[in-house]
Image: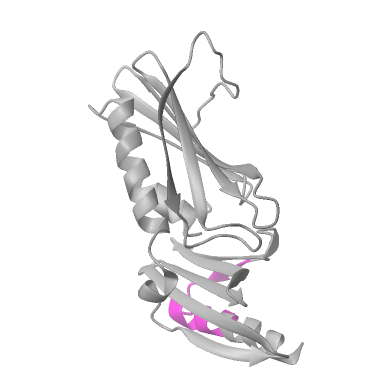
Amino acid sequence: MRFNQKIIIVFLLLSVFAVGTLQFVDTVEAAAWTKYNSGKFTNEYPAAGEKKIMTYQSYIKGTNQLYVNIYSYSKKTNKKKLDTRLTFNKKNGIMKTKMIDYSWNYTSPEQFKTSQSVKTAYKTSMNELIKGLSVPLKSKAFNMKTFKVKKNTFKTYSVKNDDSFFSGFIYKNNEEYITFSLYKENNTITYAKFNQKRVLTSEKNFNSTQTLSTIYKNELDKIVNKIKLS
């Protein structure tokens, strides 16, 4: 899987696995790094309390090192927060990349052989990332439902990313409330659930005697029933 594909998987909670390693400078050295590109885009997957607008700023060093900071913004204070950092480092035809996701608190590094420059890899990855995050969940959901509990409106979005990955999004009053994912690798199905602050609250494994879709439906039903009984 190439990095531009993995970026979308990571952002949509489709993967909690990573390969490869990469060390990278965490601070901008004014004499060594140069601002390269910046912009903003609409994020249709903001955490509760965050605006849908995100901005990014990239820096480049020479021709083989580049990184980009992606920021989210608070609805209440409008203060920006470093949400994600992507890094690109190429040497001897090997591209090393890393996504440091501060919002979900994990890192996803990878490396692969390529003729692409770091600029090309960066632009391709950002285009795919923006494209993925800017599409409303309701246009991807195969099983969208709405229900009310104590005057609060809840919406569930089920997204089948491929045959080995399902994502579930539960929104409360149009803000992210609970998110979970199911990922099948070899004979193991991994389940991870996060709260509205994107803190991991549950993680467990299933064997593959049950289908991914069956487990997904059961876990979604458990969450919905618990909300309705609250």
How far from the left and from the top, in percent, is residue 161? Answer: 38, 66
Above or below, comparing residue 202 to residue 57 in the picture? below
Question: Hey, which residue is sitting farthest front in the picture?
Answer: 77
Q: Quadrant of the C terminus?
A: bottom right
How far from the left and from the top, in percent, is residue 227? Answer: 69, 85
Residue 153: image quadrant is: bottom right
Q: Residue at x 44, y 79 (%)?
A: 213
Q: Residue at x 28, y 32 (%)?
A: 120
Question: Hey, which residue is sitting farthest right in the picture?
Answer: 230
Instruction: Look at the image and tell me whether residue 93 can be seen.
Output: yes
Q: Is residue 107 magenta?
A: no
Question: Hey, which residue is sitting farthest top in the picture?
Answer: 31
Where are the magenta residues, as a range? Answer: 204-219
Q: Is residue 205 magenta?
A: yes
Q: Is residue 122 left or right of residue 147?
A: left
Above or below, comparing residue 54 to residue 123 in the picture? below
Q: Residue at x 34, y 54 (%)?
A: 131
Foreground pick, 156 / 5: 156
* Number of residue marks: 0
How far from the left and from the top, in percent, is residue 8? Answer: 40, 53
Residue 179: image quadrant is: bottom right
Instruction: Look at the image and tell me whether residue 20 can be seen.
Output: no
How far from the left and from the top, in percent, is residue 185? Answer: 45, 60
Q: Is residue 215 left or right of residue 198?
A: left
Foreground pick, 52 / 129: 52
Q: Residue at x 65, y 53 (%)?
A: 74
